[in-house]
Image (cartoon, grey):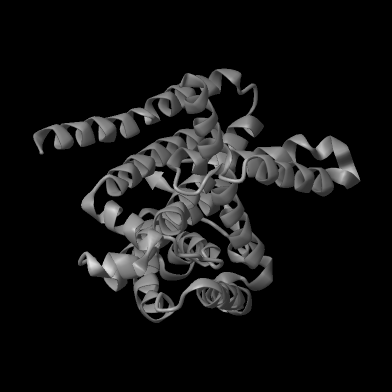
């Protein structure tokens, strides 16, 4: 028993050690950034990676599909916009309120939705996301309607957070923290229960897992991750529109998780980097930009059906043997 526990602790530390190269890359990357444009792209990668990590916890580890997760990004984004502009709440408190509001909405909505399975669950979450996007677009008095609204600058300890380079460090550190929390959750008894639910809900119930409670819990956690990413996205841009919470954004988040690798925290970052950087890198194709992006995405899924990170890990472990 002690030997098994020791092996588990070593494996857990190994999972956390995997973040060390990411931290090193984060420190080294600014040396390759000649302008604010590159800082902005890198910041967007980390911001979407935060949302992808939360969605990966839900889809990759708990096996629950969500096609409306951008709605929670919208809640976080509009919280930091509406709070200061309409209610006089400082941006930092608005940020926290957005996360708590997303958790509350996820708790209320998740109880009935998570009783569904498969395609029914996917359609229900899709409807939820579309509903939030409609609210953001139609409530013009609060949200500015389709034209959107400006977002007040966030100040932390009398230090205004502005500029792409500043948001690069904020988003990068936040991603490392969120990834560490996710890895600790995965390696906890709750994480093992979630993997049991993913493999078989019936078997999970037989061994005593409260399936409904665990599914609801991880849905709330993933919503908070998305809300934090949405707030960062709005604060980085200084402006927000309903498109940030639209259907296409939800599909983009799902694609980031699937391309990077379901069940892989590192894969969430890789998938986010792929879908954020590639459209920028393919602009020289002009009218064929989207076609090239589609072909690359299809090729990745054909030759790496498990996602980029799990497929590469499997290939490297096979060569090592």
In the image, what residue occupies the spot 40% across and 54% down?
61
Residue lying furthest left: 2
Q: Is residue 145 left or right of residue 155?
A: right
Q: Please state the total of marks drawn on the protein image.
A: 0
User: How far across and how far down the image is residue 41, in percent?
Assistant: 62, 37
State the residue in front, 276 or 120: 120
In the image, what residue occupies the spot 24% across and 48% down?
188
Residue 268 to residue 250: above or below: above
- The picture quadrant where one finds residue 224 is bottom left
Q: Is residue 171 left or right of residue 192?
A: right
Q: Is residue 190 left or right of residue 148?
A: left
Q: Is residue 196 visible?
A: yes
State the residue in front, 305 or 56: 305
Q: Is residue 89 visible?
A: no
In the image, what residue occupies the spot 35% across and 68% down?
201
User: How far across and how far down the image is residue 32, in percent?
Assistant: 60, 19
- The picture quadrant where one finds residue 275 is top right
Residue lying furthest bottom: 112
Residue lying furthest front: 321
User: How far across and how far down the image is residue 199, in percent?
Assistant: 39, 59
State the residue in front, 181 or 122: 122
* Quadrant in which the N terminus appears: top left
Residue 30 to residue 40: above or below: above
User: How far across and how far down the image is residue 130, in percent?
Assistant: 60, 74
């Amino acid at each position: 028993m002690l030997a098994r526990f020791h092996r588990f602790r070593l494996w857990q530390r190994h999972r956390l050690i995997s973040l060390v190269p990411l931290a090193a890359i984060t420190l080294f990357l600014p040396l390759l950034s000649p302008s604010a444009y590159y800082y902005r792209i890198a910041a967007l990668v980390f911001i979407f990676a935060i949302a992808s990590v939360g969605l990966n916890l839900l889809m990759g580890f708990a096996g629950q599909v969500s096609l409306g997760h951008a709605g929670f990004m919208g809640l976080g984004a509009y919280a930091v916009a509406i709070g200061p502009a309409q209610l006089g709440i400082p941006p930092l408190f608005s940020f926290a309120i957005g996360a708590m509001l997303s958790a509350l909405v996820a708790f209320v909505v998740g109880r009935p939705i998570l009783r569904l399975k498969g395609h029914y669950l996917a359609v229900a979450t899709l409807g939820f996301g579309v509903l939030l996007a409609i609210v953001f677009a139609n409530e013009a008095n609060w949200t500015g309607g389709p034209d959107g609204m400006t977002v007040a600058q966030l100040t932390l300890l009398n230090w205004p957070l502005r500029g792409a380079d500043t948001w690069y460090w904020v988003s990068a550190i936040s991603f490392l923290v969120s990834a560490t929390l996710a890895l600790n959750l995965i390696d906890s008894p709750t994480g093992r229960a979630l993997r049991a639910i993913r493999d078989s809900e019936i078997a999970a119930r037989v061994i005593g897992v409260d399936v409904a409670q665990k599914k609801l819990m991880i849905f709330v956690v993933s919503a908070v991750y998305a809300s934090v990413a949405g707030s960062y996205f709005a604060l980085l841009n200084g402006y927000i529109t309903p498109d940030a919470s639209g259907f296409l954004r939800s599909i983009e988040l799902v694609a980031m998780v699937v391309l990077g690798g379901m069940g892989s925290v590192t894969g969430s970052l890789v998938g986010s980097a792929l879908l954020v950087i590639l459209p920028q890198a393919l602009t020289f194709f002009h009218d064929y930009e989207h076609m090239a992006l589609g072909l690359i995405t299809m090729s990745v899924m054909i030759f790496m059906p498990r996602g980029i990170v799990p497929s590469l890990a499997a290939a490297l472990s096979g060569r090592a043997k």
